[in-house]
Amino acid sequence: MKLLFIRHSKTIKEEKWASDDALRPLSKKGVKVATDFFKGISRIYRDIDFIISDELTRSIQSARLLSEYVDSEYICDARLNKDASFEDFVRLLDEIKIKKDDIASIAFVADEQIIRLVSKLVSDGSINLKLKKPSLVEISIDNNSAKLVTLLTPVTLK
């Protein structure tokens, strides 16, 4: 099974946003970059069974854009939020596997905590990745072992 960890696209700058940070949306440039990025991703990953985002507006927008290019709906789940634990993520993954037994791939769209999940899956949590917005990390899960397979950014897709 492929797990695709996607960091949301570029947002409106914090200093230009006076409201709750969880509501801060993608910038116009972020929408354009995400659209081009997800078009490219859809040529590589044609079968995404589930798209799941955290509850941040910018992640939801990114998940919605991705869903336009792959034949999959998206849902939001608090177990991807910044304050969720790795165990919350594992429970979410287990629930998904119960719903459908022949899963090819799942895309998770979130903020910086996506990096923490990747690090925990492929190491003891000590890997320090810096993911640009947007970016994708593919992890392959086989027989309870995880392997980092691919790292994609908009530049690598051109």
Image (tube, rainbow, N blue to C red):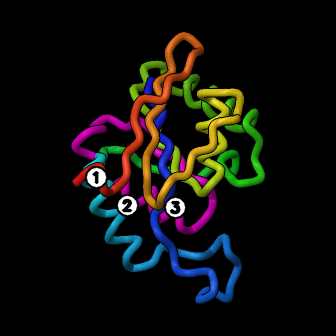
**SS label for mark 2:** helix
Vertical side of 124 occupied by 31: above or below? below
Vertical side of 2 occupied by 153: above or below? below
Q: Quadrant of the C terminus?
A: bottom left
Mark 3 sits on what residue?
60
**Is residue 57 a member of the stretch shown in magenta?**
yes
Kindly indicate whether the residue at mark 3 contacts the one at mark 2 (C-beta within 8 angstroms).
no
Front residue (pair 57, 73): 57
Residue at left offset 77%, top offset 52%: 83
Front residue (pair 121, 100): 121
Question: For this view, does 57 lie left or right of residue 26?
Answer: right
Vertical side of 126 occupied by 62: above or below? below
Disc 3 marks a residue whose amino acid type is Ile
Residue at left offset 51%, top offset 21%: 141
**Is residue 147 a member of the stretch shown in magenta?**
no
Q: In which quarter of the image is residue 54?
A: bottom right
**SS label for mark 3:** helix
Disc 1 marks a residue whose amino acid type is Tyr
Over which residues does the magenta segment extend? Answer: 42-68
Q: Which of marks 2 and 3 is nearer the N terminus?
A: 3
Disc 2 marks a residue whose amino acid type is Leu
Residue 80: % across, % down: 65, 48
Mark 1 sits on what residue?
69
Kindly indicate whether the residue at mark 2 contacts the one at mark 1 (C-beta within 8 angstroms).
yes
Separation of residues labelled 2 and 3 (CA atoms): 9 Å
Q: Quadrant of residue 102?
A: top left
